[in-house]
Image: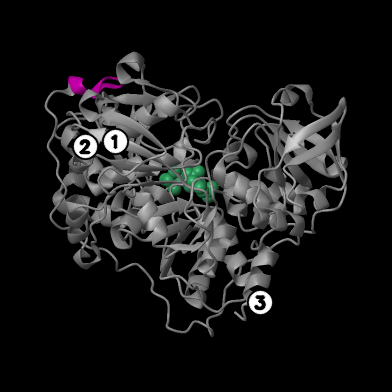
Amino acid sequence: MGRNLTQKIIAAHLVEGDLAPGRTIGLRIDQTLTQDATGTLAWLEFEALGLDRVRTELSVSYVDHNLLQTDFKNADDHRFLRSAAARFGAVFSPPGNGICHHVHLEQFARPGRTLLGSDSHTPTAGGAGMLAIGAGGLDVAAAMAGRPFFVTPRVLGVRLVGRLPDWVAAKDVILELLRRRSVKGGVGFVLEYFGEGVQGLSVPQRGVIANMGAELGATSSVFPSDERTAQFLRAMGRPDQFTPLAADEGAAYDEVETIDLDQLEPLIARPSMPDNVVPVREAAGLAVDQVIIGSCANSSLTDLALVAAALEGRRVYPGLTLDINPGSRQILMNLSASGDLNRLLLAGARLNQPGCLGCLGLGQAPPTGAVSLRTMPRNFPGRSGTRDDQVYLCSPEVAVAAALTGRIVDPRELGDYPSVSEPESYLGDSANLVFPPQDGRTVEIVRGPNIAPFPELEPLPEDLTATVILKVGDDVTTDHILPAGAEVLPLRSNIPAISACVFQDTDDTFCDRIARSGPAAVLGGENYGQGSSREHAALAPRFLGVRVKLAKSFARIHRANLINFGIVPLTFADPRDYDRLNQGDRLEFTGWRRSILDGQEDLDAAGPDGPLRLILSADDRERRTLAAGGRLGLVRRELQEEGR
Ligand code: MIC
Ligand code: SF4
């Protein structure tokens, strides 16, 4: 039987295990990316491994999230990252250069290669035929040290047929998948796109779709590498990096979804979950106060050129604010050269520097009660920085229609669709990238006072009594566990300080209560820990004393992060036990360290009303990690045993 593309890339990178259904396998990672908000910790972890240089083909350290420099903290982090990149052999992309996923697509994405990034939207590079995966910082640090990354891949084939109609965008393809399958509908899968409909999509459009596969909880999203990929790489001045790649004829998939592009219509995700999707016409008429076009999903050159063309000779609706956050400096330079930047400014748009900005609450918060339309990938509650916000997610087409009319309208009502195509060549911009010296051993790593050492984590005890410190519902995000925003983000390199913010918007008594309770357990519903890859959402609770998380199911990256920091992720043999347990209950685990190391799946605990049957589905490696209290020490030991 023919192989699908995911299997082909995996086969070329397999270093541990067999490619068989349900098996966990180890993959060689060719490239890594880190961004500043997760990168400070990832680089501290890499440093703790004791190597002189990264062992990947390419590692890039981006600064794109914490761009606000309201005091020394973010600026110190930037300087630390710049010096660590030079010390350990990574390329450094400084603040202002752009969002990691855009810049990586422009400068480094290569068909057929593997990429691991400490950001959940790393799969954006799948738009250029890479197998690109988001992970916690420690897994990325291990990959930078040449360790494999472990996955249990099932492949969901997404067959695209037809062609996108005018005013219907790549964003609508992924919103349609979210509508069908929900924010947990991709967990455990690589989403692989195939079919004749793929050809009609440019690499930046594919990037939008691959980017938001993260919102379905997918491990990765991958597109074939074809003539459109070749065209993109040529335009980027990297024609030699093209390789054609596709699934074999008749390749099998674990599941298949078909999307007929001709039948799609403009869609919109209502507050406050990316899967709360309806056709735009169902939300039409609602007055809009703020429109932001930006983020790693939709602020490519063609996205912004389309917006400029739709605005040409017109003005933004009175009283509405239209913000443009270009994806990268290169995009900004090209907009400027083509005259589109002036068209945007003449229409009344407000221009911001390339970066994540309001997508994670770093500025651009909407006013009280305002409706905000954004082309971003996430609208989790409060993420914009305004409590009780009303953030809608949509394509640039829907966003510009609202910017012109002051309401949510079906953009097809705007009339002729402006024709915008990919340029033959992009005005290049790699000038700002900082390449590392051949030998960085003499480079001094510069640390500011806010950069705290990595905390010591003691091994798992043989017996444990834990108090249920908090009970939460389904689809709890890592933004709930540890929010982003201008106050919390500067503490990402300081675990003791950021720990005081755990669950702060959910229950502001959490930290006081856990300080008194001793070892603690958190109780969650389905898809616990979806969203961001931030490992701080595991490490900070662990620092405070959380040793167990009980949930109906876990999101992939968060589950891996919990294990990496020695928190045991348990599910219920009988999901009704979730309803029976309450905040304040005590759970007793006797001899569980031994049981975990012995490979036992059923881990019984004594609960308030008798025994509870809990399940630990974890492989040997994960069990050893849990027993050791975390992965960092284990990787260090593995490297020592191999003689470095
Ligand atoms: C996000 O979009 O949620 C973030 C902020 O980019 C995160 C990373 C982080 O929390 O630093 C992500 O997607 O992983
Ligand atoms: Fe940045 Fe938003 Fe993309 Fe996250 S989702 S990388 S915060 S632009």
Residue 272, percent across and down?
A: 49, 26
Q: Give me the C-alpha separation between circle 3 and circle 1.
A: 46 Å
Residue 197 — which label? 2
Amino acid bearing label 2 = Gly
Crowd around label 3: few <14 · some 14–19 · many ≥20 (10 Å): few
Compared to residue 89, the image places residue 172 above or below, namely: above
Q: Earlier in the sequence, mark 3 or mark 1?
A: 1
Q: Mark 1 points at which residue?
A: 159
Q: Tell me the magenta residue range.
A: 405-413
Residue 10 — which label? none
Crowd around label 2: few <14 · some 14–19 · many ≥20 (10 Å): some
Residue 172, percent across and down?
A: 31, 30
Amino acid bearing label 3 = Glu
19 left or right of 573 in image: left
Compared to residue 145, the image places residue 208 above or below, namely: above
Q: Give me the C-alpha separation between circle 1 and circle 2.
A: 8 Å
Would you say the beta carbon of the disc 2 residue lies within 8 angstroms of ligand 2? no
410 part of magenta stretch: yes
Please tell me which residue lies in front, 409 or 168: 168
Q: Is residue 353 visible?
A: no
Q: Mark 3 points at which residue?
A: 641
At horizontal 57% and vertical 75% (from top left) the residue drawn is: 445
Crowd around label 1: few <14 · some 14–19 · many ≥20 (10 Å): some
Please tell me which residue lies in front, 414 or 592: 592
> Is the Cβ of the residue at disc 1 closer than 8 Å to that at disc 2?
yes
Q: Is residue 636 visible?
A: yes
